[in-house]
């Protein structure tokens, strides 16, 4: 199926971005340090629209469409031309054209346009519906690495029959295997969804871990790690094995309590944990708190992925605020795309455009040399991830 090309990311704002900076942002290949795969099967419109809505767990109501949202407008502007449609094609046109592409064809049409050389893929969520990290890289024409979810590792151990008395050592052995696996570059906790951050972050004794594992095993159904002792145990053990730890922060589905996902609630952990890299993911609307923590703790880094897509054209303000206090060496690029490949390319397009506008203003007002602006782009977009994950 013939497709089109990506519109210039600085279309409409060319005069606001110095030429050298603009050229660099157009061509630099990024490392997406937190992302998921694309759908492996064709989806209906309801599933697609549900997949471009982050907060609600309900189907999109019949009286509205997610094409009428900041993200929807961005899809119609930036992704429509990739499918051979005019910019701002309406939602009906877009959906009709999209249905002419199979899932792999959609991926190979859109993923290369993101300009990403390495995808660091969280494989712990709905892995049966989306491409594994190696397949994502194959479709995109890049490389990939894997992030393992601590809660998923623990749940798999218990579901596979690990006795509660053996659970602490089994978890350590699983993390040791991960640390030795060259494809695995880090771990992730979804404590934000399971308990919130306001828990006792002390490293628990094995006896306490066994007791909580026994309680969990006694529940009916598949194990779900939502016990703060087991979560703290997993985080401390990942740190003990020297594995970087990603933490979902802030913006997400409504089944988390947003007020309990302020990263300042992690201070007891940050003050006492081994100094392995800790990556605060997404962070909106707590991105300024995340920037402060990145300044205050050498091992803390952060990104503003996910929200960039959902803010659409307003993401320029988010990127600007993310640069308020944090050293440039402490911020990374991510899209947190999941499912529709539109999200993988939009994360890149909107970040490049926002960085050009924000840093371009600094250059134009004499607050930053253009060479420094280009260096900041490379730090956040590429080299910080290389350092943090040992790539």
Image: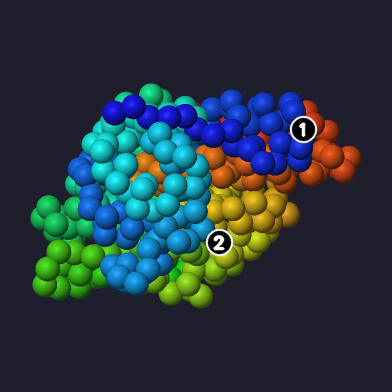
Residue shown at the point (71%, 36%) measured from the top left: 14
Residue situated in front as seen by the camera: 150 or 268: 150
- Image-quadrant location for residue 109: top left
Residue shown at the point (26%, 38%) measured from the top left: 100
Residue situated in front as seen by the camera: 115 or 296: 115
Where the N terminus falls, by quadrant? Answer: top left
Q: In x, y percent, where is residue 249?
A: 49, 61
Q: Is residue 268 left or right of residue 202?
A: right
Identify the coloring.
rainbow
- Say whether residue 141 is visible: yes
Q: Which residue is mark 2?
A: 284
Q: Earlier in the sequence, mark 1 or mark 2?
A: 1
Residue situated in front as seen by the camera: 143 or 93: 93
**Which secondary structure lies at badge 1?**
loop
Residue shown at the point (64%, 37%) measured from the top left: 10
Q: Is residue 182 above or below residue 63?
A: above
Residue situated in front as seen by the camera: 183 or 73: 73
Q: Is residue 32 above or below residue 161?
A: above
Q: Is residue 87 above or below residue 57?
A: above
Which mark's residue is nearer the viewer, 1 or 2? 1
Q: What's the mark number on residue 53?
A: none
Q: Is residue 55 above or below residue 26?
A: below
Q: Is residue 64 left or right of residue 317?
A: left
Q: In x, y percent, where is residue 160?
A: 12, 52
- State how far apart marks 1 and 2 are (Cα): 28 Å
Q: In x, y percent, where is residue 275?
A: 55, 48
**Which secondary structure lies at badge 2?**
loop
Q: What's the mark number on residue 18?
A: 1
């Amino acid at each position: 199926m013939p497709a089109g090309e990506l519109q210039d990311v600085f279309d409409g704002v060319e005069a606001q971005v110095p030429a050298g900076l603009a050229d660099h942002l157009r061509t630099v290949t990024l490392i997406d340090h937190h992302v998921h795969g694309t759908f492996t099967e064709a989806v209906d419109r309801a599933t697609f629209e549900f997949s471009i809505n982050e907060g609600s767990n309900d189907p999109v109501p019949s009286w509205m469409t997610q094409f009428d949202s900041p993200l929807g407008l961005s899809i119609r502007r930036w992704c429509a031309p990739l499918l051979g449609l005019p910019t701002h094609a309406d939602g009906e046109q877009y959906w009709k054209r999209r249905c002419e592409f199979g899932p792999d064809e959609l991926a190979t049409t859109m993923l290369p346009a993101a300009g990403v050389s390495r995808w660091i893929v969280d494989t712990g969520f709905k892995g049966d519906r989306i491409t594994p990290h190696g397949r994502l890289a194959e479709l995109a024409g890049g490389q990939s690495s894997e992030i393992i979810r601590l809660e998923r590792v623990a749940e798999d151990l218990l579901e596979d029959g690990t006795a509660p008395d053996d659970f602490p050592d089994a978890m350590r052995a699983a993390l040791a295997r991960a640390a030795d696996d060259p494809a695995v570059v880090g771990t992730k906790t979804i404590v934000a969804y399971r308990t919130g951050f306001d828990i006792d972050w002390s490293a628990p004794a094995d006896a306490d871990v066994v007791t909580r594992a026994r309680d969990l095993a006694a529940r009916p159904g598949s194990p779900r790690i939502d016990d703060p002792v087991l979560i703290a145990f997993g985080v401390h053990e990942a740190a003990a094995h020297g594995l970087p730890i990603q933490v979902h922060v802030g913006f997400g589905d409504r089944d988390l309590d947003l007020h309990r996902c302020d990263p300042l609630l992690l201070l007891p952990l940050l003050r006492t944990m081994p100094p392995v890299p800790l990556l605060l993911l997404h962070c909106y609307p707590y991105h300024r708190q995340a920037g402060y923590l990145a300044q205050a703790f050498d091992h803390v880094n952060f990104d503003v992925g996910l929200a960039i897509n959902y803010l659409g054209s307003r993401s320029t303000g988010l990127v600007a605020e993310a640069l308020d206090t944090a050293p440039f060496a402490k911020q990374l690029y991510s899209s947190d795309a999941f499912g529709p490949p539109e999200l993988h390319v939009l994360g890149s397009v909107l970040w490049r455009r926002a960085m050009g506008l924000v840093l371009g203003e600094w250059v134009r007002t004499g607050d930053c040399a253009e060479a420094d602006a280009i260096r900041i782009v490379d730090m956040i977009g590429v080299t910080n991830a290389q350092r943090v994950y040992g790539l």
